Image (cartoon, rainbow, N blue to C red):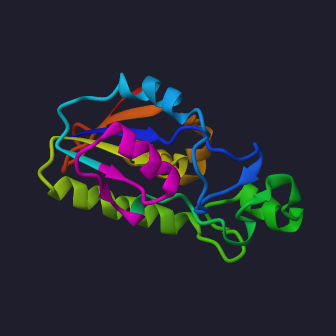
Amino acid sequence: MEIFLVRHTEVAIESGICYGQSEVYLRPSYLTDIRKVTDRLPDDFDAFYSSPSARCQQLASKLNTTQIILDKRLMELNFGAWEMKRWSEIPEDELGPWTKDFVNHRPAGGEGYYALELRISTFIKDLLKSGHKKVVIVTHGGPIRHFIKYVLKIPSENIYKIQIEPGQIVRLKISDDKSTDTLISIS
């Protein structure tokens, strides 16, 4: 199966804000931004998925005018009490341990990395059972990093070394037996 993972384009909030699962919208210029995305997506996909987050649905509705399958498992990490705070305002005694070991620490009232990993791994297993040959998925940086981790079998603690910019597309190939799993491109 070939998968095109699209990270939503830039959001309409100030840089430096932790927004995880908070409802934020794309910046007003998103219609211009998506032209860069549209040219890099296939026309012949079998299914089109999206995170139910407003920013992803906003982009997905412009990329695909037919059926969009919303799936909560594609949502970003829930940062709990940190949501909509400046990263610089999060107390060091909370942020420090998470920054050093996000795999084993979670934000206060938020979701741990393993919960995200489990959501995405379950989604991938279900996707492989679907019989689709080519899919497009509009989602967030965290879930996209886990798809890459799944394919490349890299340690969880290394996923934030992968930069996924707004509007980037990651193209993967995955199979049931994992023998042909490949990271084709990041563009």
Residue in view at x 50 percent, y 42 percent: 8
Of residues 59 and 82, the one nearer the viewer is: 59
Residue 63 lies in magenta, yes or no? Answer: yes
Residue in view at x 56 percent, y 36 percent: 166
Residue in view at x 67 percent, y 68 percent: 105
Q: Is residue 60 left or right of residue 69?
A: right
Q: Is residue 10 left or right of residue 121?
A: right
Q: Relative to 116, does residue 162 appear above or below in the rendering?
A: above
Q: Is residue 39 left or right of residue 79?
A: left
Give the total number of marks visible in the rendering. Answer: 0
* Visible residue check, residue 146: no
Residue 103 x %, y %:
61, 61
Of residues 140 and 92, the one nearer the viewer is: 140
Please give the range of residues in magenta: 49-72
Please identify the quarter of the rendering in which residue 74 is found: bottom left
Residue 5 x %, y %:
38, 40
Quadrant including the N terminus: top left
Please identify the quarter of the rendering in which residue 44 is found: top left
Residue 181 x %, y %:
28, 39
Residue 46 lies in magenta, yes or no? Answer: no
* Visible residue check, residue 141: yes
Of residues 165 and 29, the one nearer the viewer is: 29
Q: Relative to 69, does residue 149 appear above or below in the rendering?
A: above
